[in-house]
Amino acid sequence: MTDSRTSLSAFGSTGEDLDPAPTSVARCARLTAAPDRSEFPEWESPDTEWGLQTRRPASSIQTSAGHVQPQQTRWIVDGDVAEYVEEYGSGEIWGIPDTYGGFDGIDPFVTHVDGCCEGYGYGIDGAALEKALRVLTGGGRYSATEYTVILCGPYPWILTGPEGTLLCSCMPVDRPDPGEGRRSSNIQAGDTRLAVEEENDQILHGLAHFVRLLEEAKDIEIERVEYDTVRGDVKHSVHSADGDSFSMEAADLATLGTLAKTVSKVEVADRGRIKPPNGDHTVAINWDGPEHEVGDVIDERIIAGYEFAWENPDDSL
C-alpha cells in the first residue's frame, strides 16, 4: 500500500522555491469595479496608466490613518497587472502587519530620490501602507494573509486583496538627520527671507511658488513657514501676519514645483511639436494657449500653473 502523503522534497523543492514570485501574485490579483461606499467621494472617469485602467477618487478620502489624496491610491478596474509587474516590478513583495498598530513599526523604505535627497526620499512608509489598506478594505478588521504589497521601484506599487487591487504612488518619506532634526533652507516672501525646514529642491520650488501665489492672488503678507508631520503626512504650513494659515502636503508641493509657470514653458509651446509616448517621430499639437494666466482666481481657486499630459498614452501614436 502506497502512502498518499508525498513529501515536497520528492519534487526537489527548497525554501527558495516556495517564495512567491511577484508576477505570480500579480497574475492572481483580483480586479473589481471601484466600490460604492457611503464614506467615499465620487470616482473620476477611468484613466489609463502604464497599460492599467484606473479610477481615482474625485477628492481626498478621510481614513482613520489620515487623509488620502486622489493621486496616492487609484483603484485598478482593468488591465494586465502581471504584465505591469513583469515590466516595472523590483522583484520584491511584502506582507502587511497583523494589526493596525504594527504599521507604526515600519521604517520608511526609499525607492528613489529626487532633488536634494538628504532630507527626503520617495518611497513607502507605514502610514502610506495603512492608508492604502483602509482605502482598499473600507476599514475594520482584516486578515493580513489575504493582502500583498508588490514593490515596483520608483513606479507605483501594488496592494492587492479580496476587495480588489490598488495602484499606489511613491510619496515623500521623512528622513531627518538623527538627533539634528531637519536642515533648513531659505525662501523669499516679499522683502523677507524665511527659514524653512526643508532641503528637497522640488518641494522648495513648490513652496516658494505657493507663497508667491498667496501674496499676489490673495494679497497676503507671509510671516513664517512651519514644518509638521501628522500621522505620516508631511506638511508645510504658511502663516500670514493676520493670523491666517494655509497648509499643503509635501507631495502636492512637489507637484506644484514641476508645473510650468509661463505659457512658453509648456511642453507643446515650441511650435506645437512633441514626441508621443509611442512612436519615433514628433507630431504637431494644435496649441492656442490657456484661457487663464497663472495667479488668476477662478471660482475662488487660484490658477497655479500649466501641465501637458496625454489622455491615453498607450494609444497616442
Image: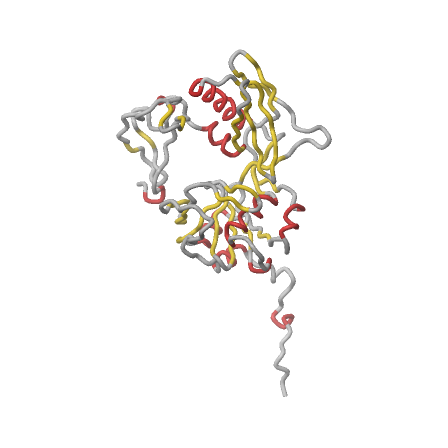
Number of numbered tags placed on the structure image = 0
Decide if residue 14 is on the left or right side of residue 207: right
Task: Write the residue at 65% across / 45% down.
Answer: 104
In the rendered view of the protein, which quadrant contains the N terminus? Answer: bottom right
In the rendered view, would you say 93 is above or below 14?
A: above
Of 24 and 72, the residue lying toward us? 72
Of 55 and 231, the residue lying toward us? 231
In the rendered view of the protein, which quadrant contains the C terminus? Answer: top left
Task: Write the residue at 58% across / 51% down.
Answer: 92
User: Quick one: which residue is furthest to the bottom in this view?
Assistant: 1
Decide if residue 122 is on the left or right side of residue 104: left
Task: Write the residue at 53% across / 16% down.
Answer: 189
User: Quick one: which residue is furthest to the front in this view?
Assistant: 242
Decide if residue 139 is on the left or right side of residue 307: right
Question: Where's residue 62, x and y in %?
Answer: 51, 44
Question: Where's residue 47, x and y in %?
Answer: 38, 45
Question: Where's residue 4, x and y in %?
Answer: 61, 81
Of 226 and 33, the residue lying toward us? 226
User: Quick one: which residue is furthest to the top in this view?
Assistant: 191
The colour scheme used here is: secondary structure
Question: Where's residue 98, x and y in %?
Answer: 64, 56
The quadrant holding residue 303 is top left
User: Quick one: which residue is furthest to the right in this view?
Assistant: 179
Of 106 and 243, the residue lying toward us? 243
